[in-house]
Image: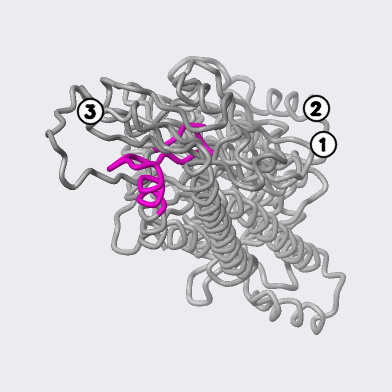
Amino acid sequence: MQNHEEAVLRLSLRRLCAAAGYTGGRLFLHDAATGRFHAEAVLDDPNPSPPVRLTRRPRQSVGPDDPLVELLRAGGRPCVLGEDRRGGPGTTRLAVPLSGPDTSTGTGTGTGLLGFALLDHPADHRAEEPLPDQVSACADLVGAAVLGVLTNRRLAAAHEEVARRHEALRRGGEAERRLSRLVGRPGGLSALVRTCAELTGKAVALFDARHRLVTSAGPVGGEVRIQPVNQILAGARVRPEGEPYEPCAPRESCEPCEPAVVPARPAAGLLRRHVLTPVLAGDRHFGWLVVMEYPALLTAFDLLVARRGAECAATEFTVQKRVADVAWNARSSLARQLVRGTSTVADLRGSGEYLGIDIDARRVLVYLTGPGARRDDPADDERLATGLRRRLGLDVLTTRGSEGLVLLVESPRDAGAAAVAARVKSAVREVCATHPGGDGLTAGVSSVAEPSGLARAYREAREVARCIGRFAGGRSPRVLAVDDLGPARLFLANSDTASVRRYVDDVLGPLLTSTAHHTTLLLTLRSWFDSGRSVRVSAVELGVHENTVRLRLARVHDLTGLDVLTDAGDQLSVQTALLVLRLQGHPALLSPDGTAADHDGRRTA
């Protein structure tokens, strides 16, 4: 098509030169986009005599405000310019305006001119001026040909625009089809980001609302080196022209947010441009979708993929959250039914099979209370359960009790009950120590219980937690098992706190001074009871002679009037008082945070 247009324009210029009696010239056509007139065809004199030496390079375009254009627009007829030094000394120039049939109706170029021809001849033609009517008639024919060329160009440009838009719609539809099919399907967010990278041919990453990388993907055969989103956000706060840019924040409307192109800012560490799109669903802000301008420049299609990818990611986040909430609620409901024993075994087994939970497994029940466990926040409960699950490698069910959180830890079938309870107690202490607000948590840990004994395990663990909360001091995570307190927990959990403290003072008051001798006597009592009231085992633990243990117990009798060696009632009174002191964290006794004391009453790990 372009060669055909050039041939038509050159032939038209040749005909016009022949009609005017000129040997060469140039044909200028109007460009509607810029308003200028560009040289489209050139006809040189084949045998210039004498040769013409141009004093300056011929102009290839003329502006709409050029005096020549004004002259032709005003006259509308050919005019001889005479000797024009712009074309060379001794050159006679004839300017011929070109117009088409539609320019008079206002539907043409808008300037009254489709173009014009500048005809040159090395000889002086002023004495032999061409006939104006003859030149004008030929100019009308040339104008019609020029109008056809310009019309073809406009049609070709319109066709190209339609084809471009069709291709954009086709690619957009393909991107929409591929991305929308991934929502709620296997692969999740990783497949979504990987598809965005394939569509754009660029590196793509997804960050959550806390600026943590969720997943990333690069073009086929390429690497992923996207910078952290907080650095991209920092570089986006000021645009190069100084206009502040604030990334979109969560909002109440659910309309999609337009992607923003973050410019390259080497001073901020951004060596390339990035497309930053918030992942929003209603008033929930899930994170950011980032497309890096590498290995090709950004296009409008990249912005479309970024926007649609962010919308699909928001939908996927919402779907995953709802699925997680449903699964969490179902597991929590099953755990509640296991503890309460309100459902039949057949119903429980059916629910367990659906959720992949063995309802016949033995379990350790953990009752968590305190400020950090009273908030009814499923996400917070999930973090506690996940931390415990990772440390133990065992399944953990959660549900809510009357005053705190209940955790059901599955016990391996081939493991000893005491060992499992000890592992659970240690893991609970570690999880509480790393959990936000874990300093105020209190945990009662039951022994390993069969499914039919979970209701009893719940009562026992809750009594332990209440004992710790009522008598233990300090803010470190306080964790004790049912076996650590024994039957006395029922008395401590349900008695008046002031009365219990007076009881301890009545029983062991003479030994509650800060002297080292009295601390040693308390330490001896603890060791003697922990060893099953064995003088020999206690002496070995304390590193003293057996007679020393007997002498110390006799000294306790002298100070308190209690015969712990032979009187069972005195033994129960002293053991209960020691238990309260242990809960209070007395330096001579094992405290609820898992630390012990040396022979001088100092805490040891």
Task: Please check the rendered image and state whether residue 30 is part of the magenta-colored stretch, yes or no.
Answer: yes
**Which coloring applies here?**
one colour
The residue tagged 2 is 499
Q: Residue at x 14, y 28 (%)?
A: 53
Disc 1 residue type (three-letter): Ser
Residue 437 appearing in the image: no
Give the vertical position of 447 relative to 28 (above or below): below
Residue 16, position as x, y percentages in the image: 41, 47
Residue 273, position as x, y percentages in the image: 40, 37
Per the rendering, the mark at residue 495 is: 1
- State the CA–CA distance, disc 1 to disc 3: 110 Å
Q: Residue at x 64, y 52 (%)?
A: 311
Q: Closer to the camera, 547 or 182?
A: 182
Magenta span of residues = 12-38
Per the rendering, the mark at residue 57 is: 3
- In-image side of 201 versus 339 (left or right): left
Give the vertical position of 280 relative to 459 (above or below): above
Q: What secondary structure is found at the residue carrying circle 1?
A: loop
- State the CA–CA distance, disc 2 to disc 3: 112 Å
Spot the residue most to the front: 127
Marks 1 and 2 in Cβ contact (< 8 Å): yes
Q: Closer to the camera, 276 or 453?
A: 276
Disc 2 residue type (three-letter): Ser
Residue 452, position as x, y percentages in the image: 75, 73
- Picture mark count: 3
